[in-house]
Amino acid sequence: MKNIIAQASRFVRDEDGISAIEYALLGSLIAIVIGTAMTSLATAIKTTFDNIATAL
């Protein structure tokens, strides 16, 4: 019984898993922001090239 309590106590104090989850969430957020920015940028570039093609 003491072994189970000791393992549970170690699990509660362990912060490595929490840090990994935080880094995963941060990485996901950065990926979403980059994806959104690239979509907006692609639309702007396409519009610019369409305007250039029309002018020619």
Image: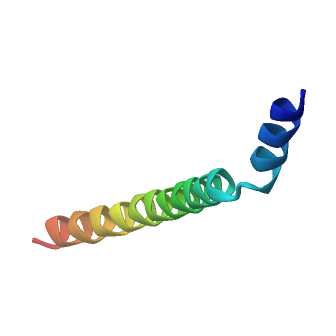
The figure's colour scheme reads rainbow
The x and y percentages for residue 30 are 51, 64
Q: Residue furthest top?
A: 1
Q: Is residue 38 left or right of residue 15?
A: left
Q: Is residue 52 left or right of residue 5?
A: left
Q: Residue furthest left?
A: 56
Is 42 located above or below residue 12 in the figure?
below
Q: Toward the viewer: 21 or 35?
A: 21
The x and y percentages for residue 2 are 88, 34
The x and y percentages for residue 18 are 69, 55
The residue located at (84%, 47%) in the rendering is 9
The x and y percentages for residue 44 are 37, 69
Q: Toward the viewer: 11 or 7?
A: 7
Q: Toward the viewer: 15 or 49?
A: 15
Please state the total of marks drawn on the protein image: 0
Q: Which of the 4 image quarters holds residue 8? A: top right
The residue located at (76%, 45%) in the rendering is 11
Q: Which of the 4 image quarters holds residue 45? A: bottom left
Q: Is residue 25 left or right of residue 7?
A: left
Image quadrant for the N terminus? Answer: top right
Q: Toward the viewer: 49 or 24?
A: 24
The residue located at (39%, 62%) in the rendering is 38
Image quadrant for the C terminus? Answer: bottom left
Q: Which of the 4 image quarters holds residue 41? A: bottom left
Is 25 located above or below residue 33 in the figure?
above
The residue located at (82%, 42%) in the rendering is 6
